[in-house]
Image (cartoon, rainbow, N blue to C red):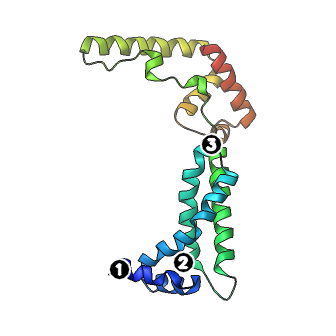
Amino acid sequence: MGINFVENNKNLSDNEVISLINAGEYENLQIIIDRYLPLIIKTAKKYCPSNEVEDAVQEATFALYSAVKNYDAQKATFSALAGVCIKRSVIAHLRKNNAQKVIPEDLLLSLEENEIAVQTNPESILIEKENYKALADNIRLELSNLEYSVLQYFLDGKSYREIADLMNITEKSVGNALSRIRKKIK
């Protein structure tokens, strides 16, 4: 019954569908999503690189739901509110992703490139642990205290801004330190 009921409501105006949703008939939210999905996709493709479009579409869909819940017909049309919410959520998504610096490609190596196999032999595991410790010790000897601290924070997943704040240095200094680290580790 619910699907046929929603199908019957497709001809209703945005305001009427929103009234039904806010009255507890949440299955009607699909009508609004179907109506505004082309705008969401168009906006996401306009502002985001192709690898981020899907995530931006998801966030914009949540923003559309928020617009439905906060809509006041006295202030604006729903289509205007939806357009603004969608655009802002896509731009916020893009800013958030750009604020988190991307780990440099040369610091990321696939398992195949490193020829690391899953070890089931205890002796092999012990040897790998010793090799790892020796590598970590060598890296520690090659890096200055500042570079080592930056590397530790970076490997803990901290952003450039967070590292800069924790160490009382600039983001530029963090970037420079990571650049020197890459050169020394090669």
Of tags 3 and 2, the one toward the viewer is 2
> In the image, what residue type sits under mark 3?
Gln
Give the labeled residue for mark 3. Answer: 100
Image vertical order of residue 21 relative to residue 177, above or below: below
Name the element at disc 2. helix
Classed neighbour count for the residue bearing mark 3: other residues with Cα under 10 Å, few (<14), some (14–19), many (≥20): some
Name the residue located 60 percent from the left edge and 22 percent from the top edge. 106
- Which badge, 1 or 3, is on the more N-terminal residue? 1
- Position of the C terminus, as image quadrant, is top right
Of tags 1 and 3, the one toward the viewer is 1
Give the labeled residue for mark 1. Answer: 2
Image vertical order of residue 73 relative to residue 59, above or below: below
Gap between marks 1 and 2, in whole Å?
A: 21 Å
Q: Is residue 64 left or right of residue 20?
A: right
Give the labeled residue for mark 2. Answer: 69
Name the element at disc 1. helix
Q: Point out residue 86 in the picture as x, y percentages from the top left corner.
A: 63, 65
Name the residue located 35 percent from the left edge and 79 percent from the top edge. 2
Q: Is residue 144 visible?
A: no
Of tags 1 and 2, the one toward the viewer is 1
